[in-house]
């Protein structure tokens, strides 16, 4: 089965390898450049000395330099990878067999159809996890200097750090797998799987955005101009901790009432998002396994 799986999915495997090489080379160049500028701006010393208070302008300039042009191609690629890759790998797995009628030969051999599917699912899932983990590791390293002075709780870094990327790829794969089975068509399964992936993607966007899970409120003393200048995009945040995502600032006398998402909420949010993706992906893949006999009898 290992050889058969490779023969049938080597195009997708080579595509994954090519995408990873491109990301790794781009991320290496980006990360080295970001570290060079970070050191030349002496941001490390400033953060250690004042927590960023004394170098707000330098931080803003640093983030503006790297968050726009240089990072844009990579961010766009990483934004589309989970849905597209999941569809490209998952759609043909059953859709192609049913569309061409080759399932009648493949599933009448000594390997039963359920074992055939479970074995292929195990191998392909392992490859997708390895891809997601590898891309996450490379991008986390490349984005390291920016993470020290920016917010990881928002895209783009939230989408490719932690467990979100790997879980999102698996979700896209499971949905495309089920779509290919139901439609008995490769292209149809890929297209339907991609658009189905948009549903959990929107749900996770709400979790990390408007719903403001794990939010907190604090009161910050201020006076005069400091109160007037404080806002949701102050650098560093009015909470005094780089990495906090400030969602609201209300002035009340000599202090500010600040609503924010603490930087420590990164992992709880990652696991919440990952759980949503995995639940949808596993449900879709499990349904595909259950329906396999019914759809081919």
Image (cartoon, grey):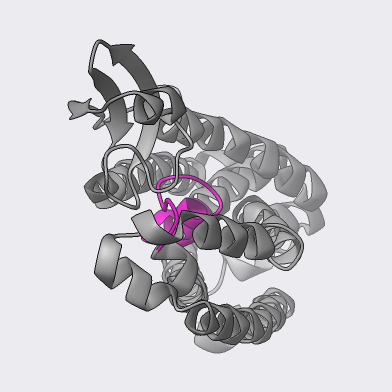
Pick the residue in front: 260 or 81: 260
Image position, residue 94 (x, y; %): 64, 55
Identity of the residue furthest to the front in this view? 224
Side of 59 where 14 appears, left or right: right
Q: Work out whether 290 lies above or below 147.
A: above
At horizontal 27% and vertical 21% (from top left) the residue drawn is 256
Identity of the residue furthest to the top in this view? 253
Q: Which residues are magenta?
A: 149-169
At horizontal 28% and vertical 25% (from top left) the residue drawn is 223
Q: Is residue 243 magenta?
A: no
Q: Is residue 152 magenta?
A: yes
Residue 200 in view = yes
Image position, residue 132 (x, y; %): 48, 69
Q: Work out whether 20 lies above or below 129.
A: below
Residue 103 in view = no
Side of 109 where 230 appears, left or right: left
Image position, residue 236 (x, y; %): 39, 48
At horizontal 46% and vertical 48% (from top left) the residue drawn is 285
Q: Work out whether 86 lies above or below 191.
A: below
Image quarter of the C terminus:
top right
**Picture quadrant of residue 280:** top left
At horizontal 68% and vertical 36% (from top left) the residue drawn is 195
Side of 122 where 40 appears, left or right: right
**Picture quadrant of residue 230:** top left
Pick the residue in front: 259 or 16: 259
Pick the residue in front: 60 or 208: 60
Count of numbered labels shown in the rendering: 0
């Amino acid at each position: 089965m290992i050889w058969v799986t490779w023969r049938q999915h080597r195009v997708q495997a080579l595509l994954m390898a090519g995408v990873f090489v491109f990301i790794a080379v781009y991320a290496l160049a980006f990360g080295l450049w970001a570290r060079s500028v970070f050191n030349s701006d002496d941001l490390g010393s400033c953060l250690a000395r004042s927590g960023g208070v004394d170098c707000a302008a330098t931080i803003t300039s640093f983030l503006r330099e790297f968050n726009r042009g240089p990072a844009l191609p990579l961010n766009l690629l990483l934004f589309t990878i989970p849905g597209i890759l999941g569809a490209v790998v998952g759609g043909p797995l059953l859709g192609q067999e049913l569309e061409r009628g080759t399932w009648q030969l493949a599933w009448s051999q000594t390997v039963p159809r359920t074992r055939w599917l479970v074995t292929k699912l195990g191998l392909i899932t392992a490859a997708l996890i390895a891809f997601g983990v590898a891309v996450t590791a490379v991008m986390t390293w490349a984005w390291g200097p920016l993470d020290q002075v920016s917010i990881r709780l928002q895209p783009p870094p939230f989408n490719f750090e932690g467990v979100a990327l790997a879980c999102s790829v698996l979700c896209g794969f499971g949905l495309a797998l089920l779509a290919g089975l139901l439609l008995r068509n490769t292209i149809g399964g890929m297209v339907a799987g991609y658009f189905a992936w948009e549903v959990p993607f929107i749900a996770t966007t709400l979790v990390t955005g408007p719903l403001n899970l794990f939010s907190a409120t604090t009161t910050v003393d201020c006076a005069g101009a400091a109160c007037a200048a404080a806002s949701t995009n102050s650098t560093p945040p009015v909470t005094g901790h780089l990495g906090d995502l400030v969602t609201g600032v209300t002035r009340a006398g000599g202090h500010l009432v600040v609503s924010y998402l603490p930087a420590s909420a990164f992992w709880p949010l990652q696991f919440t998002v990952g759980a949503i993706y995995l639940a949808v992906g596993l449900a879709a893949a499990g349904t595909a396994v259950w329906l396999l006999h019914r759809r081919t009898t």
